[in-house]
Image: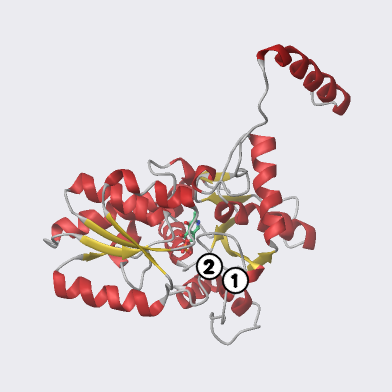
Amino acid sequence: MAKAEHLNPTGSYKDRIAAATMAAALTAGRRGWIGTSSGNGGAAMAAHGQRAGLPGFICVPSDAPVEKLASIRPYGVEMVAMSTMGPVVMAELGRIAEQENLQLTITTHVHNPEGMHGAQGIGTELAAIGGITHVYVPVGGGGLLVATAAGLRSGGSDAIVVACQPAGCAPVARHLAGELPEPIVSRCDTDVSGLQLPEPPDGPAAAEAVRASGGWGTTMSDEMVWQAQDLLATSEGIFVEPAAAVSLAAVAEDVRTGRLGPDDRPCVVLSGNGLKDLRRFTKPASPAEITTIADLAGRVSDYLAIAQRKGTL
Ligand SMILES: Cc1ncc(COP(=O)(O)O)c(C=O)c1O
């Protein structure tokens, strides 16, 4: 089973957080908002912020996927690219927010608890479906997992919560496995955008929520993430970004290691849309081979012949 959060208005579960954040900002009489984002949170805050009539200022990593940054631009908020991100930048934004009466929109419980409340709906909606034994959640800063777990509990579900992280940046999963005293690593070595946080602000709370559910952390190589992304697209017609495919890759890994059995009913949280990160699918020159009208019929019949040989037709 899958929770299709990639179908939210700006393409990720962050819309839920942005709606709650802007409601809180209006209630508190803020004159605008400020935050960091790897891209999804920025687009969501920008859209919901403009709807609320609140101007926004967003700090993004300079190496974020171009699609993520481009999808923030239409809303006309101020965007600056930072050479480094992390706790120091977040603390400085907190200070500025306080001084300037701005809403701090960082999507973690540590910085924005009222906004994160919006993501609990993922858990309560899954609890209402019933019968789900495990919920597989991608983990970057840890806030999505904490909110999902809280929603599951408040909806009466006792599903096991699994923290899914790429092995190249897995502070929470490795801490849960007893490898690290704290959910902190010195650097990240993964290409999965959105999950590159060596010091996840909600890491300790995420680890606690996993433990309370009887869950664990599962890690996988980036290559396994790409395979899961491809599998979902080619078998179900569902295109998610790598950060979301991490949850399916974790299910595959847990089936392989026997942690999941045939009687289990796992659900993966598909947190973001594939259109947010097309780096694996765009070539610099041209997205598809150029063909003339004269060649077209021949190309189609070649394709059909190959498909028939492969048994896909
Ligand atoms: C698509 C997607 N999935 C998962 C996550 C991880 O959420 P969190 O940082 O709350 O752990 C993010 C974070 O940006 C994301 O953009």
**Quarter assignment of residue 259:** bottom right
Mark 2, other Cα within 10 Å: few <14 / some 14–19 / many ≥20 = many
Q: Is mark 1 within 8 Å of ligand 1?
A: no
* Left or right of 255, for residue 16: left
Q: Which residue is mark 2?
A: 196
Name the secondary structure under disc 1.
helix
Tell which of 245 and 158 is nearer to you.
245
User: Which residue is drawn at the image coordinates 18% and 59% (left, top)?
Assistant: 32
- The kind of residue tagged 1 is Cys
Q: Position of residue 205 (x, y in %)?
A: 45, 74
Q: Which residue is mark 1?
A: 169
- The kind of residue tagged 2 is Gln
The residue at the far left in this view is 29
* Left or right of 254, for residue 161: left
Q: Position of residue 40 (x, y in %)?
A: 42, 53
Residue 27 higher or lower than 287, as above or below? below
- Quarter of the image for the C terminus: give it: top right
Q: Position of residue 70 (x, y in %)?
A: 40, 47
**Quarter assignment of residue 304:** top right
User: Which residue is drawn at the image coordinates 38% and 67% (left, top)?
Assistant: 108
Q: Position of residue 293 (x, y in %)?
A: 66, 13
Report, in whole angstroms, how far the alpha carbon at label 2 lies from the one at label 1. 6 Å
